[in-house]
Image (spheres, grey):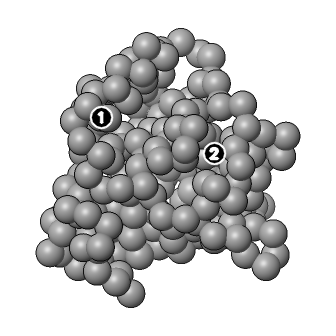
Amino acid sequence: MRPFLPGLAALTALLTLSACSSPPPDRLAGDTPPATIGAVELDRYLGRWFEIARADHGFERGCDGVIAEYERRPDGLIRVLNSCWKDGLDGPADVAEGRARIADPDSNAKLEVSFFGPFFGDYWIIDLADDYSWAIVSEAQGRYLWILAREPQPGDAFINARLASLQARGFDTEGLIFPEQWPDSTAVPRAD
């Protein structure tokens, strides 16, 4: 009789689940992680951001009107509140709350975000306007990519400039998703 290995069943289940969901494709040419910006003034970065574009990934599938809000928590972490409206701005709101921690305190440009227990994912600020009106976020492998702005309708010139900048850095911008976004920041309904 073969001895029972406690955890083998759990490991098998985990491997089966991970095989069912493949990670998003690497959107960054080469093996070099993207450079982050030199320094982020965290208090200026906190607040509300509208998602202007994103790489396709399962946890935001069907989301429009996507908003991320960041604020300090008493425990030193950052509260992350993501809201989206499913299948259009008139669809039901979906809200996810998570937390972030600073992974690189020298620059504050590398954070780690968690929505699922002890599991954290990289959140690297790779570009940021001097006035903190827009940001571009990715991670070490370039699989995740977001263009964020403080206003929901920054215009075509803004989008084209960000796409050109990403392409110059080796990012594949084909297939990015541009979710429907609110006409202005006052049009956003409460998500809760």
Q: CA distance from mark 2 to mark 1?
A: 24 Å
**Is label 2 in a helix, a strand or a loop?**
strand
Q: Residue at x 24, y 42 (%)?
A: 155
For badge 2, the amino acid type reads Asp
Give the number of the mark in front: 2 or 1.
1
Instruction: Identify the residue at the far front of this view.
Output: 131
Which residue is nearer to you in this view: 87 or 12? Answer: 87
For mark 2, what is the residue?
Answer: 122
Q: Left or right: where does residue 28 sit relative to residue 83?
A: right
Reply above or below: 93 against 115.
below
Q: Residue furthest right?
A: 106
Task: Residue type at mark 1: give it.
Answer: Ile
Q: Is residue 8 visible?
A: no
Residue 97 in percent (x, y) is at: 53, 74
Residue 75: percent from the left, percent from the top? 81, 75
Q: Secondary structure at mark 1?
A: helix
Q: Residues within 10 Å of mark 2 (few under 14, many from 20)?
A: many
Name the residue at 74% across, 45% down.
108
Query: CB of mark 2 within 8 Å of CB of mark 1?
Result: no
